[in-house]
Image (cartoon, rainbow, N blue to C red):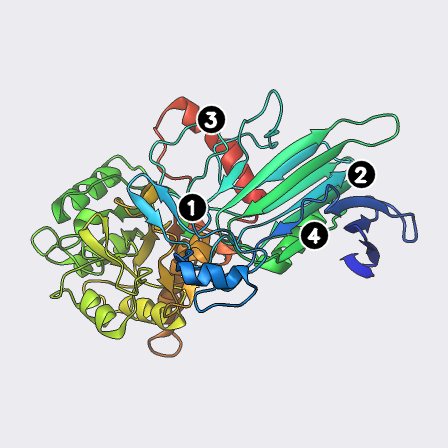
Amino acid sequence: VALGAEGALGGEVHIDFAPLRLHFFAPTAGAPVGAPLVEVATMNARGLLEYEHYRTKPEPPTAVAPATVEAAVDGEEGEGAAAEPAADAPAPDAKGLWEEEFQSHKDTKPRGPASIGFDVSLPGFAHAYGLPEHAAALNLKDTRGEGGYAEPYRLFNLDVFEYDLDSPFSLYGSVPLLLAHARDRAAGLLWLNSAEMYVDVARSPAAADAPAEVLTHWMAESGVLDAFVLLGPTPRALAAQHTRLTGTPALPPLFATAYHQCRWNYNDDADVRAVDSAFEAHDFPYDVIWLDIEHTDGKRYFTWDERKFPAPAQLQRDLGARGHKTVVIIDPHIKRDDAYAVHAEATRRGLYVRTHANETFDGWCWPGSSSYLDFLEAEVRSFWASRLQLDSYAGSTRQLHVWNDMNEPSVFNGPEVTMQKDCLHAHGTVEHRDVHNLYGHLQAMATREGLLAREADGPAGRERKRPFILTRAFFAGTQRLAAVWTGDNMAKWEHLGAATPMLLTLGLAGI
């Protein structure tokens, strides 16, 4: 089977059926057309392709009446004889298969175990990169053996305050992309699966009869095997192949690359104006000032505290007159207050994520009791976008841009400070476990839709501006929608040092 690699250069995949293996071949970097291909990736080389499937939980065995037992012994069916369970059905009380507990939380797992895993070997490579987001080295460490980590790299978006350094533990975003590079070749693998994932990385050193090799083992709690092998053969070609799949970064507005002034928290209109005036007095250039959650009316997003910010639109216009933009925080959790228009409409239209019992999910975040919009639904994304329009978002102007925070999603009273995996999306048809790592990406998609619509509105001939969006949570392809940052560090020199490999890894993953 011939595959396209880069221009006139071609790659091949050879398929072995018993045992099943896929061998991927590509040209070496700089090789002329027609030169021999080299093997750059092998899927299932170690036979680790395994998968579960959805099942119906078997009923627990019932007590059998004595007469029924006697009838069964005599070879008769008997009224109480139980049907044989499916050959591969785990026992109803098998630990962790049909139900899991984490501290005080319970995951019902109504479809049973649904994990999937496979291995990919990368012959001819000793260096591997990618798998953001982790506070870890640029060149991925082994997760087996001495000198590396004792656990695999975890991809599961979480709100991790003041995160540990040099760790494979999850942070705010996930891109399940691994890249390998050698002097004469480059290859990669992208697995488009947004469930919780683990990736083991190991290396086999070169020997007399075998090249060096990077060995990887990918495991996800659920989802499908929707994987793409990138054949290179150069880093530039890898980047092109990856962005053809997930998209290129959106061109940011010019001010996005300038100095931004942000802290928690500016108290009121006078505080913002005092900071702005101080920058002017000291002739210190800045382009953007940011407002955190205290600008809102009781942490109700799309609102303003009228006592602190009595004229927010005028404030934005005054700042804008000197070329200064405003960014406000808008998180995905919505305060459960029937007098709050956003919550009232979302409730009436059934736009929230639901529990496994099909009730509106109620979690705890900055406003207290909160519900979370189901951004998996196009209708919900359109609703969110509509709230960003000038006629809906009172006090907003075209000078206002958006910061999406806490969108892993963060749930203070949830397991690992996030949403229960058995919550339901799309009118109860999709479990949260299958789409967890997409949540922040989808919120950013809705925000971008709204800001683009806001710019499109207005008289013909008016100059349209590119929007600025910052998101904390992300997935493969978020670069098309928003910028990201590396989250809540500790403002120490060690964390500043860790930011460099983190940012480089994000860049390699297209973010």
Crowding around mark 4 (Cα neighbors within 10 Å: few <14, some 14 to 19, many 20+) is: many
Q: Quadrant of residue 507?
A: top right
Identify the mark at residue 497; answer none if there is no mark.
Answer: 3
Q: Which residue is mark 2?
A: 184
- Of pointers 2 and 3, the one earlier in the residue sequence: 2
Instruction: Specify the farthest residue to the left.
Output: 307
Q: Which residue is mark 4?
A: 229
Where residue 70 appears, as percent x and y from the top left, is 48, 60
Q: CA distance from mark 4 to mark 3?
A: 32 Å
Q: Which residue is mark 1?
A: 157
Question: Can you tell which of label 2 and label 1 is closer to the viewer?
Answer: 1
- Is 395 located above or below residue 47 in the figure? below
User: Is label 4 in a helix, a strand or a loop?
Assistant: strand
Amino acid tagged 3: Gly
User: Is label 2 in a helix, a strand or a loop?
Assistant: loop
Amino acid tagged 1: Asn
